[in-house]
Amino acid sequence: GYHTGTILNLELKILDQLFNKKQFVTLGKKETLLEIEKIEATSKDILLLQFDLEDFVNSLEIQLKYESINWGVVSRIISNAILKSIGTNIFDEVIQHVNKANELFQINLVHNYKQLKNTRAVKKPQIVSKILEYIDFNFKDEKIAVIVIDGLAFWQYELLKSKFPGLKNEEVIYSWIPSITQLSRQAIFKGGVPDSEYKQNPKNEEKLWKLFWKEKGIDDYQIRYAHESVDLSNLNSVTKFGIVFTELDEKMHSSTDYNDLLKLTENWIVRNNILVIVQELLEKDFKVFLTTDHGNIEAKGWRGLSGREKMGTNKSGSRSERHIEYSDQWLADEFMQNNTDLNSSVVNEDHAIYFKSDLSFSNKEKLVTHGGAHILEVLIPFVEIKNDK
């Protein structure tokens, strides 16, 4: 009873509600859009009733007052608040509190981040570069699958996790900083400190994955890698399976704001076959680990780079608008000398300049991206999904 082209790409929960409101006559495009708006408005009202802003603020402030802050708890608190306030009139206020938490998180990074790279991953990995070490230490003789969803922020994981079967051991770990794919996803598949000269592509990623496991004594025929298209046939001999999904990251880069990204994420969850893949892997006795290389942030535009400022940049090939990498340190230093207003908002190290606040090298008022050191980019999920049979 609705205009087909208008409802074609809607998320399942809205289609369900449209179906339940059966129409006696076929509606045109305008009337169909009105029905959709009513459902979306009602959904936001219900979400807002479930979310108590004062309770969020109090819970967050309590956590941030501890001498030793549990950043995993903080990440869950702010992710839940973001998810429930996107598209509402209190979203901006929620983000203000998230940014206050980020200021303390940046102090934490200064004092503790470098030490994370040298931690032992016996009980859990603290950072993406230790994921394979953790798996090798604890599950070397078992069938394991590592699924990496490129660009999955913790609030997006909150949307996804209720769909998965089985029991979940959920940890919050750190992405590599700066949070660009070339470094952080490389760190996952290399199982160690990323190489700045590495070129990000599926072929090189597969080489890293196979090299790590071969050095651990696993035969080539036991190792498999998949990028976006996943073949689940002939898995009897496979014991180490690496899987990457990149479509969600592409949707993130095309989003104007979190409201856009929320809808695209819901749509991706419905359309992508990740849930089926996880279920089949569990049925084939794989231990399934789910993670990402970095989160994302709804950033504000500081300004775009001038022609001279772009000279010697893009060494990494990153499309992030929160990170620039120069071929020489003096170019980065010159940029900072000419833009002293950024001193409190960026980090300048190893030829690279990246934001730790919510700004971006863009002329856009708002955009969704990654590549910096903000708490929303850096704290990410690492989850073991177990078969509950």
Image (tube, rainbow, N blue to C red):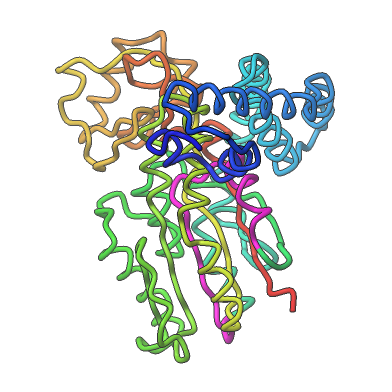
* Residue 141 is inside the magenta segment: yes
Q: Which residues are magenta?
A: 140-164
User: Does residue 347 appear anywhere in the picture?
Assistant: no
Q: Is residue 229 visible?
A: yes
Q: Is residue 318 magenta?
A: no
The location of residue 284, given as percent across then percent down, is 56, 83
Residue 105, compared with residue 199, is above or below; it is: above
Relative to 7, residue 46 above or below: above
State the residue in front, 183 or 247: 247
Residue depicted at x 35% and y 86%: 220
The residue that appears at 48% across and 39% down in the rendered structure is 10
Judging depth in this view, the residue of 180 and 258 nearest the camera is 258
| Percent position of residue 80, x then y | 70, 36
The image position of residue 100, as x and y in percent, is 66, 20
Q: Residue, x 64% and y 30% (percent of image)?
A: 82
157 over 361 or under it: above or below: below
Relative side of 302 to 306, left or right: right
| Image location (x, y in percent) of residue 202 | 29, 61
